Image (cartoon, rainbow, N blue to C red):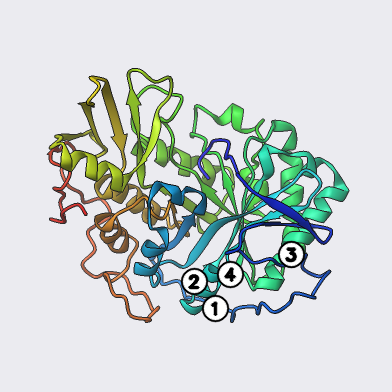
Amino acid sequence: MRNRAWVWVLVAVLVGAGIWMAADGNRNQVAKPGVDRSNDNLQVPAKPAPRAKVPGQLFILGFYDETEEARGEDILATLRRHRNHIEYLSPFWYSVRADGRIVDRSDRDLRDFAARENIKLMPLFNNYQGTDAFLHDAAARRRAVSNIVDLVRRYGYGGVQIDFQLLEPRSRQELTTFLRQLRQALPQDKAITVSVIPHRHQEDRTQHSKDAYSYKGLAQYARIVLMAYDRHGEMTDPGPVSPLDWVGEVVTAAREDGVPADKIWLGIPAYGYDWAENRDKAVPVPLREIRTLTRRNDIQVRRDADGIPHFTYVDDQGVRHTVWYEDEVSVARKVRLARRHNLYGVAIWRLGYEDEPYWRMLLRETGRTGMDMTPDRNRQRDSENKDADGDAGDVQEGHPGNNPDGNAGS
């Protein structure tokens, strides 16, 4: 999801004519939908009843990336704790190859879990190894659309998340055409979202007209996820991942480009970057790992005017590091911005990075009533929610365990 080339390490075998399956004994070995039903012992989960959107509330979409479980993060545990607060879940399951075939690493257990908990699955489809060949070949494009529709119908998905990155400007019209054909082929009750690179209101306007993402064109057929993070990242100097004024300009640019507010998901980060003096690029670090680092080393955290935390430290080898990250204080301001603009919801990058103080903030600022884990899905606006313009001080300094809610870091 973040704006970088994702490396998919897949052991795949060709099954049928169009779907590639991961050769993992814990995965489902299912043939191409619509072609071979000989192994059709897997049943489609019951269709989740739609969760009503309460006025003034933001929906929550969570990205679920199983490829990073090696970091030791229990992503499923996070999902279980907050199952009643996530309306949409986008697991990294599928990749579209150059010829329109699909690499499939879906997980039956997660499908069943989502169905039981009334969470709409919107699996993510990326472009395999950054290819855009299928967009420019009419037959391959039709094959990709057909295979995606087959998967949605077979497994009863609530929709799809399209995350095609590293696209050249030449793909601008073809990407919009792909979304149009997908929208026409999918039932109207199946949601489509597409991730887009953010553009500022003024600085990037000229470039935006030339790149692969036509905000207005894509919004005719899908909701868009504004990836409003990585303003500073792996290949930049140290700085805030998601500065508030920049996020505001990104939202304004999308609105002025003709995207309705209710067709915008605002991507919000739950991570930061560590810049070391002896490295050429920064390393992404989950929020929960940063909490551990600061607590164990009694590191004092400072905040900029937007409440974004940052600090420096020297490691055991004598190397100096600079860390900027996002937490419940800084992200709260961006969620309030989303509510002021009446956006559709917020999309967390990504589940497993965040911690409980982050969730307490998220439930409050999106208009939830609290940490209620009962099956009641009728969300009501929190009557005690702070005014959208209210906030803690603009500059804070102190241990990261301290925050205006009085919540200690986990």
Q: Are marks 2 and 1 in contact (CB under 8 Å)?
A: yes
Q: Residue at x 26, y 20 (%)?
A: 319
Q: CA distance from mark 4 to mark 1?
A: 16 Å
Label 2: which secondary element: loop
Q: CA distance from mark 2 to mark 4?
A: 14 Å
- Graded by Cα atoms within 10 Å as few (under 14), some (14 to 19) or many (20 or more), the crowding at tag 2 reads many
Q: CA distance from mark 1 to mark 3?
A: 18 Å
Label 3: which secondary element: helix
The amino acid type, in three-letter code, at marker 4 is Arg
The amino acid type, in three-letter code, at marker 1 is Pro
Residue, disc 3: 149
Label 4: which secondary element: helix
Q: Residue at x 71, y 71 (%)?
A: 153
Q: CA distance from mark 2 to mark 1?
A: 7 Å
Q: Which mark is residue 108?
A: 4
Find residue 356 and report its horizontal and vertical position in percent: 26, 58
Disc with the residue nearer the chain's start (2 vs 4)? 4
Find residue 46 and report its horizontal and vertical position in percent: 59, 81
Q: Where is 347 relative to 274, above or below?
A: below
Residue, disc 1: 48
Disc with the residue nearer the chain's start (2 vs 3)? 2
- Graded by Cα atoms within 10 Å as few (under 14), some (14 to 19) or many (20 or more), the crowding at tag 3 reads many
The amino acid type, in three-letter code, at marker 3 is Val
Residue, disc 2: 119
202 or 235: which is nearer to us? Answer: 235
